[in-house]
Image (cartoon, coloured by chain):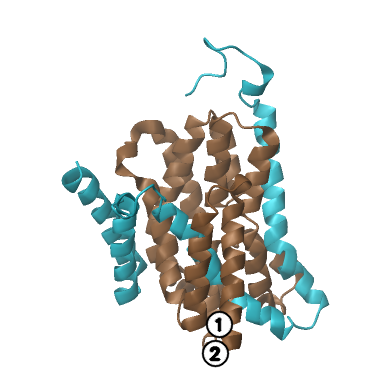
Amino acid sequence: MIPASGGVVGTSAGTTAMSDARIWLAIVLIGVATYGFRYSFIHLFGRIDAVPPTVMRVLKYVPPAVLAALVVPDLVTLRPTVAATLLDERLIAGVVAGAVAWRTENVFATIGVGMVTLWILRFVVLA
Amino acid sequence: MHEDLRAGARDVSPLLLGIAPFGLVAGIAAVEAGLGFTQAVGMSVIVFAGASQLAALDLIGANAPFAVVVATAVVINLRVVMYSASIAPHFAEYGERLRAGLAYVLTDQAYALSIAEFTGDTERSRWRYYLGVATPLWLVWQVSTVIGFVLGAGVPEAWGLTFAVPLVFLALLVPAMKDRPTTVAGAVGGVVALLAAGVPFSLGLLVGATAGIVAGLLVEVVT
């Protein structure tokens, strides 16, 4: 458990931990908005005949673009030098896992090899 | 159990391994952010979206302003609108109540597996297959959140269990880049998201995704 704000530095209103009621409010607001996103087009679709071909063409590129935008910042951290950026345990493990995903298309193998590579780099090679 | 429900459950089973550590981390992060047990479980049931839950917990723990916590978590989930639009035609024939229920469990993983099944040459019942995928994901998410909360900070951070998260997305990304335009969409989306990683409110994800989609369309037009 982390203590609430305060301690040595002081207790201005801006550093006070969120109250229980506010945490619940945040959870409900995030939940309602997220459900709204999920239901949006699934709900609206009953009122229109078909998604226009242009929209379908755009949607074809949603999965690769979104998945890559999620993955790359998790694997790569830009550092001052190229070497420091490339010699990153997460990037190396990610590249190895990516090769496994490409060769096998097996999610289980991808996660297993990726995690083991990370642990070898972290606890053996770079330890 | 219906055969199509079982087919979905079978296809999702390898992904559950990636979800479990993610859920554990969400439970642990909830403890660290100062949430109670009911709040931690409530968040996983009400929000049911891993990346945004983790972002919200991180910001709550850092005493971020209320509006920033909510806005960041909501923005991260905007991509689900695109999944909703993409999967909507496949649910169009179903009644309002069933569609409202199906929408609740729409996640990255449920979308990726189901859209591959729906666009393939298949006679399966779509809602059954989709629920076969989504139900185990939901159950594993809730159970692993509870276990994570109970374990608290017991799992050493050095093991880097959160790394399983990008590995899950990676395993879904590689088969999604199946021709030149989709490969360019992925490459541009990833690079732009990386360059925009410092943008506030996690907008880098949306900026990168948009750039990737535009790049894919451009390549399609040119070739």
Residue hosting label 2? B223
Residue hosting label 1? B219
Quarter assignment of residue B175: bottom left
Of all chains in the rendering, the one displayed in cyan is A
Q: Residue at x 44, y 49 (%)?
A: B22
Quarter assignment of residue B87: bottom right
In this view, which residue lies farthest toward the front?
A81
Q: For chain B, what colour was chosen?
A: brown
Amino acid type at circle 2 is Thr
| In this view, B95 is above or below B16 | below
Horizontal side of B125 relative to A115 (left or right) equals: right
Give the alpha-carbon distance from disc 2 to disc 1, as whole Å. Answer: 6 Å
Quarter assignment of residue B196: bottom right
| In this view, B15 is above or below B4 | above
Q: Residue at x 51, y 48 (%)?
A: B142
* Residue B3 in sight from this viewpoint: no
Query: Are the two marked residues, 2 and 1, in contact with CB atoms closer than 8 angstroms?
Result: yes
SS at mark 2?
loop
- The residue closer to the viewer here, B217 or B104, is B217
Percent of width and height locating residue A1 = 47, 24
Q: Which mark is residue B51?
A: none
- The residue closer to the viewer here, B47 or B51, is B51
Amino acid type at circle 1 is Val
SS at mark 1?
helix
- The residue closer to the viewer here, B161 or B214, is B214
Percent of width and height locating residue A49 = 79, 83
Q: Residue at x 73, y 80 (%)?
A: A51
Horizontal side of B130 relative to A85 (left or right) equals: right
* Residue A37 in sight from this viewpoint: yes
Percent of width and height locating residue A106 = 34, 71
Give the crowd class for mark 1: few <14, some 14-19, many >=20 residues within 10 Å.
Answer: some
Chain letter behind tag 1: B
